[in-house]
Image (cartoon, rainbow, N blue to C red):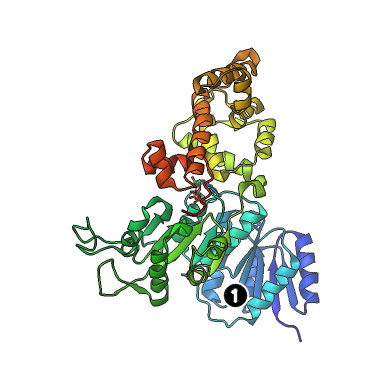
Amino acid sequence: MPAGSILVADDDTAIRTVLNQALSRAGYEVRLTGNAATLWRWVSQGEGDLVITDVVMPDENAFDLLPRIKKMRPNLPVIVMSAQNTFMTAIRASERGAYEYLPKPFDLKELIAIVGRALAEPKERTSTPDEDAEMEAIPLVGRSPAMQEIYRVLARLMQTDLTVMITGESGTGKELVARALHDYGKRRNGPFVAVNMAAIPRDLIESELFGHERGAFTGANTRASGRFEQAEGGTLFLDEIGDMPMEAQTRLLRVLQQGEYTTVGGRTPIKTDVRIVAASNKDLRVLIQQGLFREDLFFRLNVVPLRLPPLRERIEDLPDLVRHFFALAEKDGLPPKKLDTLALERLKQHRWPGNVRELENLARRLAALYPQDVITASVIDGELAPPSVSPGAAVQQGVDNLGGAVEAYLSSHFQGFPNGVPPPGLYHRILKEIEVPLLTAALAATRGNQIRAADLLGLNRNTLRKKIRDLDIQVYRSGG
Ligand SMILES: Nc1ncnc2c1ncn2[C@@H]1O[C@H](COP(=O)(O)OP(=O)(O)OP(=O)(O)O)[C@@H](O)[C@H]1O
């Protein structure tokens, strides 16, 4: 007896053949069609235990058909395959009630496993496809396999309230993903509140999160609400969670365990209904080993781990991302720009330590500073790799002050370009050349303590934090 009957709709004969073989071999009875009308006829006649369908078919788009299928047979699992591997395809599939979304090309073994799982599950899924939900601009760009896997996980998470832990280097899009989880999830009508643990003085974190009563500590002249209260009914994004002090961690753990908290200085427990999304660019397991992060809290937060790959691991997304950022710049009134083939190749060679943020900043600089419509490799070379100030060279030339070193550097820098003129944008490039080693030295001298580094530099702490982000400076904290 067949394990179940499967309806397959795809206008590509080769795919139908492959699916037919694989599913029949796995013991299923298979019916094949190349159009949506036949699929709909079978479904409405009550045939099939599961549907596998492509999105684009000659007569109708599966996303238009899905809500009808779900209305007529809410418990019929539908697996959607698509070659348009974008975030919105994954989300749309999930919103329209698909059981699972598979970007093409897919692994047949995986498909068979999903079919088995779908047929084995109890049939009480009721989805609420939001038929007229208008899609805004795509928030997440990239079609690399790594990003597609992320979209699939996100799509599955949309209808849940599970705690998500996003890890990834700085600038990989952690906050953007947290926002997407909120904006397309079931809490989208509630507030999205983001708190960056690294940006709040450590002794104020608890009151920032949980609020405080009047007189709870010196300076607490009035009662103040905390971020938990502000995020009620919505999502609380705890960014750079690794920077949370121990006492605050203990308090947060209690909230996650008990679903209630007390304000600083308060006694009455307050119930909370907040979805937590946490993020870290540090390896929390290392912090746990160093005794800086509670392991029990880690397990509470790490319910669904999501690792965002660095840009260099998905460099095939670069052209899409550049186009996206040029389009955003254009929307802001900057002139349209394109890259020529060689320029694109140069960008692909770069290591992108600041990830997508670094690329975004570069695209904006290119749009703002260069008059030509088509950006060439020489512009990119000038932007990405200005020869760095070499103290050795300066000393060799008998220069022992910074001004002299910069002067010597500039003279050889200018000579390195045709006609002795470097590409535009020189001012910011040179300042960046100086700012990066200056801030790095200050951070190294204070062992990564941003508060002390800001004092050392005579900068406002928030200014320093902003510069660290904008200049993509890696901060390594070592104790203290
Ligand atoms: N896949 C993507 N598609 C489009 N834009 C992206 C993508 N990933 C990141 N960005 C953009 O790059 C910038 C950095 O992203 P984001 O702030 O989310 O990174 P992050 O990982 O939270 O960084 P940090 O750890 O430094 O806080 C943002 O402007 C964001 O919009």
User: Hey, what amino acid is under mark 1?
Assistant: Ser
**What percent of the width, then of the height, locates residue 358?**
55, 40
Q: Residue at x 49, y 54 (%)?
A: 479
Say above or below: 12 vs 162.
above
Is residue 61 visible in the rendered image? The answer is no
Pick whichever, 307 or 364, lies toward us. 307
Is residue 451 visible in the rendered image? The answer is yes
**What percent of the width, then of the height, locates residue 324?**
55, 41
What residue would you read off at disc 1?
A: 44
Which quadrant of the structure image shows residue 332? top left
- Within 10 Å of disc 1 (Cα), the crowding (few <14, some 14-19, many 20+) is some
Residue 440 lies left or right of residue 254; in this view the side is right
Pick whichever, 84 or 400, lies toward us. 400
Say above or below: 25 vs 394.
below
Pick whichever, 64 or 163, lies toward us. 163
Dot 1 beta carbon under 8 Å from ligand 1: no
Q: Residue at x 53, y 23 (%)?
A: 426
- Disc 1 element: helix
Residue 86 lies left or right of residue 294; in this view the side is right
Residue 23 lies left or right of residue 279; in this view the side is right
Total numbered badges shown on the rendered structure? 1
Q: Quadrant of the N terminus?
A: bottom right
**What percent of the width, then of the height, locates residue 328?**
49, 39
Which quadrant of the structure image shows residue 52? bottom right
Q: Which residue is situated farthest in the top direction here? A: 419
Which quadrant of the structure image shows residue 345? top right
Pick whichever, 312 or 99, lies toward us. 312
